[in-house]
Amino acid sequence: MSWILDDNRPIYIQLVEQIQMMIITGFYPLESKLPSVRDMASEASVNPNTMQRAFAQLEAEGLLYSDRTKGRFVTKDKEKIMKIKNELAISDTKNYIKKMKELGCDKNQIENLIDAAMKEEQ
Amino acid sequence: MENILECKALRKAFPDCVALDSIDLSINKGKVVGLLGPNGSGKSTLIKLINGLMTPTGGDVLIDNMEPGIETKRIISYLPERTYLNDWMKVKDILTYFKDFYNDFDLIRAKDMMNKLSINENDRLKTMSKGTKEKVQLILVMSRDASLYLLDEPIGGVDPATRDYILDTIIGNYNENATVIIATHLISDVEKILDDVIFINKGKIELVSTVDDIREKENKSVDALFREVFKC
């Protein structure tokens, strides 16, 4: 797993997004334990305080919870993860459509393009 | 939160120039702070005032509520821009020297890092390249359990891969109550590991902010903002 951070957006927000992806894709499964703030920070080559801030936000969203003695875990709530997955999928789709409209494609063309690309994938 | 460093109306003047003027600054414990400014902006002067190598012309500098002196040197680990080590010394001599000199020097940690960077303990400083010498010094400095690390241009002479290792070393080795101040103009390299940045120019503070605040408000990296603020 690699961390890719771009230059212009706040670092903690990018960490939140990438950890969300790791949870959605099952890299960190339901109820699994996460590495410590320090280890995660070191892996991503970021400041531990920034990683801490990302964790705090994920806890506030309910994707993570921490147990005072045992550490930090992925939520038990499968619905929660599905909900966030859905939100991400919708927002990425909207972005895609917006881009295609900027290129001047209409609904029909977009659908054709998706069909063609899907066929190529298989 | 408690401050590890406080400067009040700090001023340093030389016969024909004012190096620093009316510097007011508080830095919390547990932070990694970038001291950023163009050449000749006063970065090194500020660092030398903090560790007592220079005395202020006016104002105060307090480290953990103490004026610079023996007690503050005990808790400050300083990486100068130029080496002060004798170049006939072997790495193992220098390790013993540091162990002898500083109670908080962690010999095992130092040896481990020398190993990882393939630095031979029997090599003499004078046979090493500029970059390797810099690595040795940084390892020495980061192997102390200090409260305040003052790093003056820690990555200037090393290649990008080693730069990453050194930055990882910096964030991996300081403990949660320690503060690291990094003076540099290689901003894009250090940006990810910083909490706060201080822009200093012509002896005055131009801006104090967190990295993420800059990115949030300006929609650009600290590096891009620096280039804009200090455009020649």
Image (tube, helix red, strand yellow):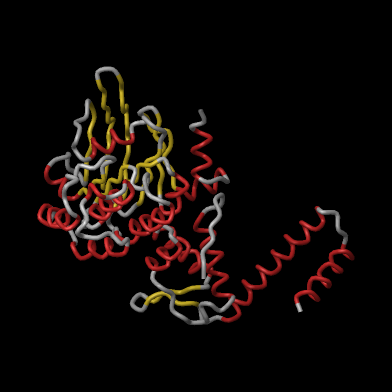
From what the image shows, is residue B128 above or below residue B50? below
From what the image shows, is residue B135 above or below residue A54? above
Is residue B110 or residue A53 the one in the foreground? B110
Identify the residue at horizontal 40%, vertical 64% (top origin).
A42
Q: Image quarter for residue B13?
A: top left
Identify the residue at horizontal 53%, vertical 48% (top origin).
B215
Res B173 visible: yes
Left or right: B224, with B197 as reference point: right
Q: Can you give x and y, in whole percent of width and height, for residue B20 in the image?
A: 31, 28
Find the residue positioned furthest to the left: B100
Res B28 visible: no
Find the residue positioned furthest to the right: A108
Q: Can you give x and y, in whole percent of width and height, for residue A40 in the image?
A: 42, 67
Identify the residue at horizontal 24%, vertical 60% (top origin).
B120
Q: Can you give x and y, in whole percent of width and height, for residue A122 in the image?
A: 76, 79
Is residue B65 or residue B145 the one in the foreground? B145
Q: Can you give x and y, in whole percent of width and height, for residue A30 in the image?
A: 52, 82
Q: Image quarter for residue B171?
A: bottom left
Question: How many numbered marks have been drawn onto this rendered protein structure?
Answer: 0
Find the residue positioned furthest to the front: B127
Left or right: A41, with B227 as reference point: left
Left or right: A33, with B69 as reference point: right
